[in-house]
């Protein structure tokens, strides 16, 4: 049975376990990547991607880094064409090495800035995972969303997963906080979509209080505070809280840590004279 068809293979890392050495390869096939943040992100975004057709999708992973998402998606969806784009040459060398190990012929990596990247035909999906906040926080949100729209074919979809404004996040006061960008609010995302010709299909808050607690607890077991026993004990707590958070129901007014945005480019939007995004602003993507 192939890695893409194994029953229950739902967690990130299971489809790309073959590039790891044993015994990690065996463990990863069953459990996926152990990193709690990657598991939280995947649990939110993968269901939206898994609902798309299994064939004929052309996807751009904008700001792919070392290619974790691009590799996993290409392995799970051999009928998709996946392109990973990033400006970090060192990260892309690691991504390309992993691609070769996995023999993924439906995946390629491109070094460059998003503003300068042109590809025909346009993409069915542009994926942005925890990267848009850097430009938006520096005042480049309008330019970035215009680039998203230009990269999409008519009716193509933007899938964006990013942070909620720090002032709206449900931080626990007695736990340490990670560094956080003070974007996005729901109003900011709606305005960015309107200005770039994107229609919002879904804008959901993700990671409630339990999910936020996971992020804060993980700081206790990282960096200079790391202790083997502490990390091992807290990891089980983190996994339990993350699972509890996924089952919880949240209303539109509930405080959350992250946003999941699904938006479509309106037909004809490509014919508009969208203002050019300065390349200097795009260098962080």
Image: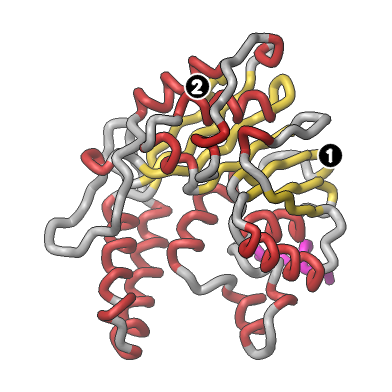
Tell me the residue at 67%/34% (across/down).
116
Say which quadrant the C terminus sits in: top right
Q: State the predominant SS element of the stretch in magenta.
A: loop
Q: Quadrant of residue 196?
A: top right
Residue 219, image x, y percentages = 29, 69
Please state the extent of the stretch shown in magenta in the rendering.
1-9
Q: Is residue 49 visible?
A: no
The alpha-carbon separation of the residues under discs 2 and 1 comes to: 26 Å
Instruction: Kindly state the secondary structure of the residue where label 1 is placed.
Output: strand
Tell me the residue at 69%/22% (across/down).
155
Residue 29, image x, y percentages = 66, 76
Q: Is residue 30 above or below residue 150?
A: below
Q: Is residue 126 above or below residue 277?
A: below
Extreme residue toward the front, this view? 280
Q: Quadrant of residue 239?
A: bottom left
Can residue 246 be found in the magenta stretch?
A: no
Residue bearing the label numbered 1: 56
Say which quadrant the N terminus sits in: bottom right
Tell me the residue at 72%/41% (across/down).
59
Instruction: Kindly state the secondary structure of the residue where label 2 is placed.
Output: helix
Of the image marks 2 and 1, the number of the one nearer the N terminus: 1
Mark linked to residue 193: 2
Which is closer to the viewer, label 2 or label 1?
Answer: 2
């Amino acid at each position: 049975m192939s890695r893409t068809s194994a029953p229950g293979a739902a967690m990130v890392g299971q489809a790309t376990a073959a590039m790891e050495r044993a015994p990690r390869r065996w463990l990863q096939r069953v459990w996926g990547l152990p990193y709690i943040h990657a598991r939280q992100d995947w649990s939110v975004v993968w269901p939206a991607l898994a609902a798309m057709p299994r064939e004929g999708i052309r996807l751009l992973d904008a700001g792919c880094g070392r290619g974790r998402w691009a590799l996993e998606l290409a392995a799970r969806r051999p009928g998709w064409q996946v392109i990973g784009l990033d400006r970090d040459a060192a990260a892309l060398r690691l991504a390309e090495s992993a691609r070769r190990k996995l023999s993924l012929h439906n995946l390629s990596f491109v070094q460059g800035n998003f503003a300068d990247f042109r590809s025909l035909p346009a993409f069915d999906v542009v994926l942005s995972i925890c990267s848009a906040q850097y430009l938006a926080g520096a005042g480049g949100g309008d330019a970035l969303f215009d680039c998203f729209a230009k990269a999409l074919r008519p009716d193509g979809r933007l899938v964006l997963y990013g942070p909620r404004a720090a002032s709206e996040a449900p931080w626990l006061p007695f736990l340490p906080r990670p560094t956080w960008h003070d974007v996005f609010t729901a109003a900011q995302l709606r305005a960015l979509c309107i200005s770039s010709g994107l229609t919002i299909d879904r804008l959901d808050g993700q990671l409630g209080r339990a999910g936020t607690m996971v992020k804060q607890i993980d700081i206790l077991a990282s960096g200079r505070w790391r202790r083997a026993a502490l990390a091992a004990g807290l990891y089980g707590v983190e996994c339990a809280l993350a699972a509890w958070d996924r089952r919880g129901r949240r209303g539109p007014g509930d405080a959350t840590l992250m946003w999941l945005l699904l938006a479509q480019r309106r037909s004809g939007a490509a014919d508009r004279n969208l203002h050019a995004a300065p390349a200097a602003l795009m260098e962080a993507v």
